């Protein structure tokens, strides 16, 4: 698939934003009020800002962005529609949580329930984003059981790294976030390694023969079009295997570096800031690879022997 930068930005930014928002909700439910008004306002602005920027950028990939709201009506059958509904529903609860958690509204008993609800809604939205791709049976590399868990752990890892970095910048203790961020990073590395093993070794049994039902010896005589069209540009993008392997290694090196910096940040808090930046770069690289390595079955009709 052709990696659309608007969608890459969407999944990277909104994933980090929802991960941060979920951790704010969970730490608020456990610890009560925010350590300071500045911390509460800054972290919520960053979380909701990343989420909003990501959601807005996702509409840039649409042919008619002004009609994006119509997708919300198909929530019974479409994971894309459910994602939109979940994203919208999250906003009022996140704002309500922010008001009581920051102390701007004095309802201390509401901090825990609103924090838990906000965390659930944030992770639910990330879950629906992952399901959009995991349920596409036409793209073998995405139609995997690990697609959704990877989205969730990436959100927690990047959100946790941001929480840790912001706490460091403001001179505050990150609390219980570092072990959560470290665990999410470890799980992400393990799941991604397993995911790439699965898609590399999965049988490539989608061929022109079984697509047409004309037998094993069917061959394509000529391509459907004489010039490149939209389907070929968007669905026919192929990343060379040697490039993919090199980018995968770079991704794991970035994860290792981010993990090492996070480990060192327990003694030298300043390392938490570059750790967060490196993890966001790793997220961007992983998202690019995720889309680039997705082969759509429609490419069979444009000369691809199997998909």
Image (tube, rainbow, N blue to C red):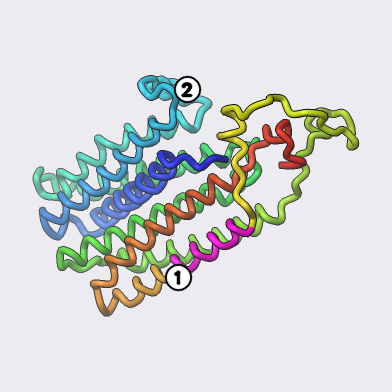
Dividing the picture into quadrants, the one containing residue 38 is bottom left
- Horizontal and vertical percent position of residue 143: 62, 43
**Most prominent secondary structure in the magenta stretch?**
helix
Q: Which of the pair 286/158 is nearer the observer? A: 286
Task: Work out whether mark 1 precedes mark 2 in sequence or the reverse, and give the earlier one.
Answer: 2
Q: Residue at x 46, y 43 (%)?
A: 127
Q: Most extreme residue toward the front, as rendered? A: 226
Q: Is residue 215 left or right of residue 195?
A: right
Q: Residue at x 45, y 70 (%)?
A: 256
Q: CA distance from mark 1 to mark 2?
A: 41 Å
Above or below 270: residue 167: above
Q: How dense is the environment of label 1, judged by Cα within 10 Å: few (below 14), some, or many (20 and up)?
A: some
The dot on residue 137 is none
Above or below 164: residue 97: above
Residue of label 1: 256
Q: Secondary structure at mark 2?
A: helix
Q: Is residue 197 left or right of residue 163?
A: right
Q: Which of the pair 128/240 is nearer the observer? A: 240
Question: For the residues carrying marks 1 and 2, which lies nearer the camera in this image?
Answer: 1
- Horizontal and vertical percent position of residue 10: 39, 42
Q: Which of the pair 54/26 is nearer the observer? A: 54
Q: Specify whether residue 113 is in view.
A: no
Q: Which of the pair 100/274 is nearer the observer? A: 274
Residue of label 2: 74
Q: Residue at x 75, y 49 (%)?
A: 203
In the image, the segment drawn in magenta is: 242-256
Q: Residue at x 71, y 42 (%)?
A: 307
Is residue 32 inside the magenta stretch?
A: no
- Horizontal and vertical percent position of residue 210: 81, 34
Above or below 225: residue 4: below
Q: Are marks 1 and 2 in contact (CB under 8 Å)?
A: no
């Amino acid at each position: 698939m052709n990696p659309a930068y608007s969608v890459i930005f969407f999944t990277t930014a909104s994933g980090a934003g929802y991960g941060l928002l979920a951790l704010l909700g969970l730490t608020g439910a456990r610890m009560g009020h925010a350590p300071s008004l500045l911390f509460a306002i800054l972290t919520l602005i960053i979380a909701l800002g990343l989420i909003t920027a990501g959601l807005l950028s996702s509409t840039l990939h649409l042919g008619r962005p002004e009609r994006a709201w119509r997708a919300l009506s198909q929530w019974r059958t479409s994971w894309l529609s459910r994602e939109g509904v979940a994203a919208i529903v999250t906003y009022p609860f996140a704002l309500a949580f922010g008001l009581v958690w920051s102390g701007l509204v004095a309802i201390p008993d509401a901090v825990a329930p609103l924090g838990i609800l906000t965390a659930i809604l944030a992770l639910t939205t990330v879950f629906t984003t992952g399901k959009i791709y995991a349920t596409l049976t036409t793209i073998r590399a995405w139609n995997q059981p690990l697609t959704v868990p990877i989205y969730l752990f990436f959100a927690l890892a990047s959100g946790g790294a941001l929480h840790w970095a912001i706490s460091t910048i403001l001179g505050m203790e990150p609390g219980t976030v570092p072990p959560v961020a470290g665990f999410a990073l470890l799980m992400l590395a393990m799941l991604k390694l397993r995911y790439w093993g699965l898609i590399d070794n999965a049988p490539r049994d989608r061929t022109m023969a079984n697509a047409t039902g004309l037998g094993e010896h069917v061959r394509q005589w000529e391509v459907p079009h004489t010039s490149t069209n939209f389907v070929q540009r968007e669905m026919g993008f192929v990343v060379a295997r040697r490039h993919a392997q090199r980018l995968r290694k770079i991704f794991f090196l970035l994860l290792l570096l981010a993990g090492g910096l996070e480990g060192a940040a327990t003694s030298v808090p300043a390392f938490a800031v570059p750790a967060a930046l490196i993890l966001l770069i790793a997220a961007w690289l992983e998202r690019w690879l995720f889309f680039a390595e997705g082969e759509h079955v429609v490419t069979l009709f444009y000369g691809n022997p199997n998909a």
